[in-house]
Image (tube, rainbow, N blue to C red):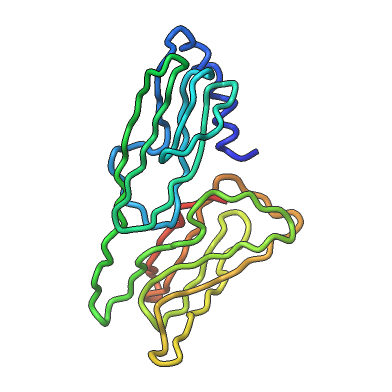
């Protein structure tokens, strides 16, 4: 079950306990007023009285019988504002704004081995046999990174995306085809560069598998 729909079910008890309050807004995701986030979209989870109307970025979204509502915020610029609002039947309203900032790219020395980010998977995913898990990351060019799925598979190779003019781009791609019997829960993807015989540079995905 998708964890956001699980949120809808679990949140029911809280929402019904607040039924006497005709207007409230509780935001679960985002967890902070200002968020640095590098992916293209961000999942939203909140709740209100089931009788209220809810809007995410001024677009109405479904309020479930539990009072929960979910949605997506798209990061189309370096700074974006997420606006969440709820309206009661008598026209009263509550709203909250959140600021999303895209991380500023760090400048690394030419001889440094680094992993800047693991951009994919950026969100939680449910996969079954035959599905393809795609992992993307950015780091120092000319390396041979691997990624691991804890409890499933290790040392899955990634290939650098090459440019016709500049050679190595520092952008890497790896894929894994899910097999029958593969099993894991809430696992982040680990990406590794081998720096030396006994050390590695490591980074982890934002999304879980």
- Which one is in front, 159 or 76? 76
In the displayed structure image, the side of residue 35 where residue 25 appears, left or right: right
Image coords of residue 119 (percent x, y):
44, 62
Q: Quadrant of the N terminus?
A: top right
Image coords of residue 68 (percent x, y):
52, 27
Q: Residue at x 44, y 18 (%)?
A: 88
Q: Residue at x 60, y 21 (%)?
A: 65
Number of marks drawn = 0
In the displayed structure image, the side of residue 168 where residue 184 appears, left or right: right
Image coords of residue 91 (percent x, y):
41, 18
In the displayed structure image, the side of residue 201 where residue 134 appears, left or right: right
Identity of the residue furthest to the bottom in this view:
165
Q: Residue 153's image quarter?
A: bottom right
- Which one is in front, 114 or 134? 134
Identity of the residue furthest to the front in this view:
91
In the displayed structure image, the side of residue 124 where residue 38 appears, left or right: left
Q: Residue at x 47, y 85 (%)?
A: 162
- Which one is in front, 107 or 199? 107
Against 154, residue 29 (above or below) is above
Against 8, residue 179 (above or below) is below
Identity of the residue furthest to the right in this view:
180
């Amino acid at each position: 079950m998708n964890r956001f729909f699980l949120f809808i079910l679990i949140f029911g008890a809280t929402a019904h306990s607040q039924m006497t309050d005709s207007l409230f807004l509780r935001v679960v995701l985002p967890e902070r007023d200002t968020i640095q986030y590098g992916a293209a979209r961000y999942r939203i989870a909140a709740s209100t009285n089931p009788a209220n109307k809810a809007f995410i970025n001024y677009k109405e979204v479904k309020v479930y019988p539990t009072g929960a509502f979910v949605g997506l915020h798209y990061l189309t610029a370096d700074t974006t504002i997420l606006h969440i609002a709820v309206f009661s039947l008598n026209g009263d309203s509550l709203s909250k704004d959140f600021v999303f900032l895209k991380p500023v790219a760090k400048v690394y020395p030419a001889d440094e081995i680094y992993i800047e980010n693991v951009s994919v998977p950026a969100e939680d995913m449910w996969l079954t046999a035959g599905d393809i898990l795609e992992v993307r990351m950015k780091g120092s060019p000319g390396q041979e990174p691997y990624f691991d799925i804890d409890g499933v598979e290790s040392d899955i190779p990634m290939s650098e995306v090459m440019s016709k003019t500049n050679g190595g781009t520092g952008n890497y791609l790896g894929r894994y085809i899910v097999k029958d019997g593969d099993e894991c829960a809430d696992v982040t993807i680990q990406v590794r560069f081998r720096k030396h015989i006994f050390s590695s540079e490591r980074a982890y995905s934002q999304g879980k598998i």
